[in-house]
């Protein structure tokens, strides 16, 4: 049994499938998915994949801590959770991650910046010459 570790970066080399969005593991190979700040989804395209939580899960998610996923199955992985995957024969799967939402502008900073700029006289600049 071999072990590997995955982060949010795409997997390459031995784990890379012919389709760049699919990942393969050799039969009985184990992969550790480290926790990240975003929510993720695991989708099995072919074969079977054993999934177990490597970190304690809160509430109802604790029931899904040790399961088999078959072709067409998916599993929502809570943000911050760490998982162990073990491949059955000829498994192909995808890991999708929730996009990071941009932070809205800090209204207090914008207000303060507006006050700072209001201290300066407004000038109309035409051809490099102030009006």
Image (spheres, helix red, strand yellow):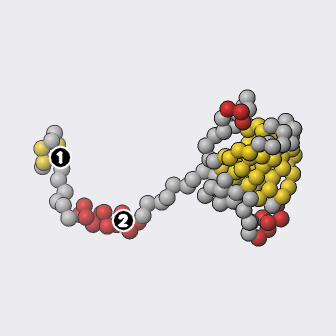
User: Which residue is outermost to the front?
Assistant: 1
Query: In this image, 100 relative to 94: left or right?
Result: left
Q: Nearer the viewer, residue 103 or 38?
A: 38
Which quarter shows the N terminus?
A: top right
| Residue drawn where x is 74% and y is 66% of the image | 56
User: Which residue is outermost to the top?
Assistant: 18
Q: Which type of secondary structure does the marked residue at label 1 adopt? A: strand
| Residue drawn where x is 68% and y is 47% of the image | 5
Q: Position of residue 48 (x, y in %)?
A: 86, 44
- Give the number of the disc on residue 125: 1
- Give the number of the disc on residue 109: 2
| Residue drawn where x is 74% and y is 59% of the image | 54
Which one is closest to the eye, mark 1 or mark 2? 2
- Tell me: residue 37, above or below residue 94: below
Q: Nearer the viewer, residue 63 or 41?
A: 63
Local crowd size for mark 2, using a 10 Å CA cut-off: few (<14), some (14–19), many (≥20) = few
- Give the number of the disc on residue 94: none
Name the N-terminal-most of marks 1 and 2.
Answer: 2
- Tell me: residue 43, above or below residue 38: above
Q: Which type of secondary structure does the marked residue at label 2 adopt? A: helix
Disc 1 to disc 2, how far (Cα)? 27 Å
Q: Nearer the viewer, residue 10 or 13?
A: 13
Q: Position of residue 40 (x, y in %)?
A: 69, 53
User: Which residue is outermost to the bottom?
Assistant: 59
Q: Nearer the viewer, residue 82 or 102?
A: 82
- Tell me: residue 51, above or below residue 90: below
Q: Position of residue 122 (x, y in %)?
A: 19, 57
Local crowd size for mark 1, using a 10 Å CA cut-off: few (<14), some (14–19), many (≥20) = few
- Tell me: residue 93, above or below residue 63: above
């Amino acid at each position: 049994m071999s072990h590997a570790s995955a982060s949010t970066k795409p997997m390459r080399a031995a784990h890379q499938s012919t389709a760049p969005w699919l990942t393969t593991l050799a039969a009985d190979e184990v992969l550790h998915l480290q926790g990240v700040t975003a929510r993720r989804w695991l989708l099995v395209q072919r074969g079977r994949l054993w999934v177990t939580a490597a970190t304690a899960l809160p509430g109802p998610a604790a029931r899904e801590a040790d399961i088999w996923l078959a072709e067409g199955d998916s599993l929502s992985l809570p943000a911050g959770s760490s998982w162990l995957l073990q491949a059955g024969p000829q498994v192909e799967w995808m890991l999708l991650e929730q996009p990071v939402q941009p932070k809205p502008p800090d209204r207090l900073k914008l207000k303060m910046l507006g006050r700072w700029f209001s201290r300066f006289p407004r000038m109309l600049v035409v051809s490099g010459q102030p009006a």
